[in-house]
Image (tube, rainbow, N blue to C red):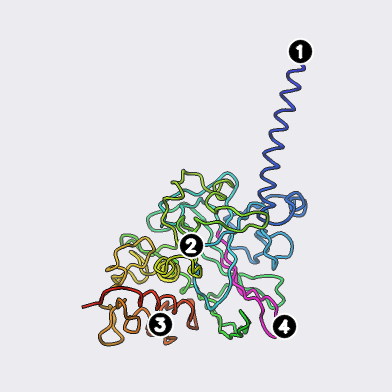
Amino acid sequence: MKQKYLLILLFFAFAGLIHSCSSDEDALYDDISGGSSKQTTVQNNAPITIDLSQVPLPKLSDYRFFDGPIHNQKPNYKVLPYKPASDLFTDYAKKKRFVWMPKGTSASYNGADNVFVFPVGAVLIKTFYYDNVQPSNTTKIIETRLLIKTQEATPTDSGWKLYEYIWNEEQTEAYLDTNGNGSFVPVTFTENNVTKSVDYRIPSATECATCHKINPADKGDIIIPIGPKPQNLNFTFDYVGSSANQLERWKKMGYIGSALPDLATIASTVDWKDTSKPLETRAKSYLDANCAHCHRDGGHCAYVPMRLNFSNTNMSTFGACMVPFSQTQSGSFVIYTGRASLSEIVLRMNTNQESIKMPLIGRTTIHNEGLQLVTDWINSMRGSCP
């Protein structure tokens, strides 16, 4: 009798443990989605599964990344929102980013300024949109880009594939772009009581690959992600139900499977708009987000000697007093310390001329706020170039 009673107690204790773990996981999802995980499960009937042999799917909704109307961008179960500390400037477009990985898989740490090593089946989701679009102050979603890890990496193929989904005017669906030619979308919007008009550029397949490619050891170009690096995620993110360090949240969700270093030891980028941070840290964070993916070993602009990654502490290779590879004004340096007006980097940021502007892809208008930040930083530098 005692043995039977003990078995009953063990059974209920085990059942309670399972329920507790499930409840914790559901609560974690509720923090992320702002909704009931149980209701989401009922609505969607099953967890997300993606048959990689069928990728790319014809419509964004086919993946089931979002619960309810997809224009709400409410993440489905295990679809985790994230944000880098500093955004890439894309004609003032706003972005929503999400990561999803198949059940039982996780990414591995590969250094603070390197992208995580993602498992096969992982998906990175990035939606571009504008708020307060005129004349009716509406939200307009333009495109959603997917990076899908379709196979294990080889020396000549990273396994990542890029897919572009373009939203319809009704904002009810996004459809796979099958021609890959890109297009322009005129948008007039209001931000901070200022009305702006841009010709937003949906990139061509070639333009996407230009920024997302790397050529390691001259073995040919391969596609890689850019943003999800530990240095970019090591800050508190405001989830719907709570705030948490993103790296800790990824770990808790099971999306990081390897050990992480002490987060305090990671040299991390910051939000370049945060004026409480040092000017140099803000400027280098901005340049890392907007320039470093090309200006790095194996990147599209690897032939230019400057390296604009945040972790580069050698100012001579960051561009200080460096003679430009292709000079556009006499007496200039890439960064002319103390003299922004004679710095090539400022000149290229301050033009829309195709043969001169930088970044060369991703913008059709000048980012005045970013330009001012870099100008102020260079003018604050001590010393002068010879």
| Residue matched to label 3 | 357
Q: Earlier in the sequence, mark 3 or mark 1?
A: 1
| Residue matched to label 1 | 2
- Magenta portion: prevailing SS class: strand
Q: How many marks?
A: 4
In this view, 112 is above or below 173: above
Q: Residues within 10 Å of mark 3 (few under 14, many from 20)?
A: some
- State the SS at label 4: loop
In this view, 56 is above or below 103: below
The answer to if 139 sits in the magenta stretch is yes
- State the SS at label 3: loop
Image-based side of 160 in relation to 10, left or right: left
Amino acid type at circle 1 is Lys
| Residue matched to label 4 | 136
Front one among 160 and 87: 87
Q: Earlier in the sequence, mark 4 or mark 3?
A: 4
Q: Residues within 10 Å of mark 1 (few under 14, many from 20)?
A: few
Image-based side of 262 in relation to 198, left or right: left
Amino acid type at circle 4 is Ser
Residue at 79% x, 12% y: name it. Answer: 1
> Is the C terminus in the top left, top right, bottom left or bottom right quadrant?
bottom left
| Cβ atoms under marks 4 and 3 closer than 8 Å | no
The answer to if 184 sits in the magenta stretch is no
Amino acid type at circle 2 is Gly
C-alpha separation, residue under disc 4 versus residue under disc 3:
33 Å
Depth-wise, is mark 2 or mark 4 nearer the camera? 4
Q: Earlier in the sequence, mark 1 or mark 4?
A: 1
Residue 177 locus on image (x, y percent) = 58, 72
C-alpha separation, residue under disc 3 versus residue under disc 1:
81 Å
Residues shaded magenta: 124-145
| Residue matched to label 2 | 227
Amino acid type at circle 3 is Lys
